[in-house]
Image (cartoon, rainbow, N blue to C red):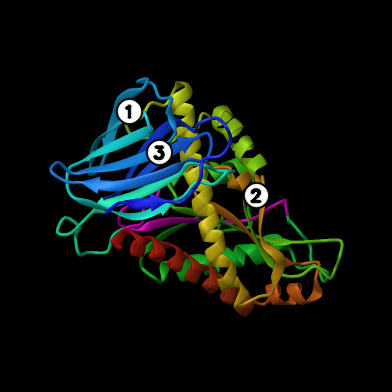
Amino acid sequence: MGVAVSGRAWGDEPAVVRGVLLQQSGPAVRVSVALDRQAQARTFFLSAPDRFVIDLAGARVSLPGGAAGEGPGAGLVRRYRYAQRAEGARLVLDLDAPAGLVRQELGGRRQPDLRFDIAPTAPAVPAAPQRPVELAGRSARRRTIVVDAGHGGRDPGAIGVTGTREKDVVLDAALQLRDALESRGRYRVALTRDADAFVPLEDRVRFARAQNADLFISLHADSHANGEAQGASVYTLSEHGATRAQGMMNAQNWDIDLGAAPRRGLVGDILVDLAQRETTNRSAQFAQTVIPCLGQVSPLLTNTHRSAGFFVLLAPDVPAVLIETGFLSNAADERRLASPRERQHVAEAIANAVDQFFNAGMTMARA
């Protein structure tokens, strides 16, 4: 049965297909289609042989093979083919087994790209729990979580109204979070620092990438001239930060795993951009998961989910959030953050959010 994807093409020009990226995660495959503007899409499966078809009404193909061509597969996708048709663009994925659509992300005007997650249908899908669809290259057994305690050593961070130092409370919170996560038996936790040491920002990002982290959580405590400012907040990468990340990729010679896809030229740039957007989306998903968990144990700052270009959020292939656990410039927040018991509550809330985040992915992959 076909699935109609809502969305209307806008403007006088047709949408242009700029890139296609396939990424395997366990038994599932994510199909990302880069568009320069919103387009109406329809998807359906065919059998004998098994195929997954994406029709983009009125869209124009602009890929290396011209109006028709093919690209490498991933996982259960043997290869993909594309062609320009009178009614628009068609993308066909040749499959090794029957499959079903387990998730789709619909493009909007600001981010028109489309994403479809497909996975084998029974009996090809094992009964054992499966990992969620995400960027390729992650551990299939245990999730790797990098916990980053902000500041440290010669950099004390914010200083509270009675002298509480940010570097001290966030280090203890990071250690508590490590213990909470490791007690679950399903995570490997790595700390950017486990003592009062100064760690440069670039080393923190480099460490997370070297660990091939599934998630990066940076812990901080805020300060403001207005002593009434109170509550936790969660930051993810802003649009300006995404541009900064592209510059860092070039400066640091960072490489993103694109499978068999090309890494150079216009196509490589488009696919890297797709992968980076996927990372940003995953970061935002975790932010939306952790906020209500934090709200159960601490006050929340108004407009809790915020965006910024913080350096520790710049890794293009590691979903990352920066959590401001509260304001040390606020007397009530300082008392809360100075309490080991309250820091333990915060750590457990974040750990619960990590569970929910990855459990949601497992449910999606099994659907």
- Which of pointers 2 and 3 lies earlier in the amino acid sequence? 3
Percent of width and height locating residue 47: 16, 46
Identify the amino acid type marked 1: Ala
- Of helix, strand and loop, which mostly describes the magenta segment? loop
Q: CA distance from mark 2 to mark 1?
A: 54 Å
Disc 2 residue crowd, few under 14, some 14–19, many 20+, Cα 10 Å? some
User: Could you tell me if residue 136 is visible in this image?
Assistant: no
Frontmost of labels 2 and 1 is 1
Percent of width and height locating residue 60: 44, 28
The magenta stretch spans residue 148: yes
Identify the amino acid type marked 3: Leu
Q: Secondary structure at mark 2?
A: loop
Identify the amino acid type marked 2: Phe
Asked if residue 250 lies left or right of residue 34, the reply is: right
Q: Secondary structure at mark 3?
A: strand
Residue labelled with disc 1: 83
Dot label at residue 4: none
Residue labelled with disc 3: 56
Identify the residue at image location x=80%, y=74%.
331
Q: Quadrant of the C terminus?
A: bottom left
Residue labelled with disc 2: 198
Q: CA distance from mark 3 to mark 1?
A: 11 Å
Asked if residue 352 lies left or right of residue 174, the reply is: left
- Between 53 and 220, which is closer to the camera in this rendering? 53
- Between 256 and 173, which is closer to the camera in this rendering? 256
User: Could you tell me if residue 106 is visible in this image?
Assistant: yes
Residue 267 vertical position relative to residue 160 in the rendered view, above or below: above
Give the magenta-colored segment's residue range: 131-155
Percent of width and height locating residue 52: 27, 43
- Which of pointers 3 and 1 lies earlier in the amino acid sequence? 3
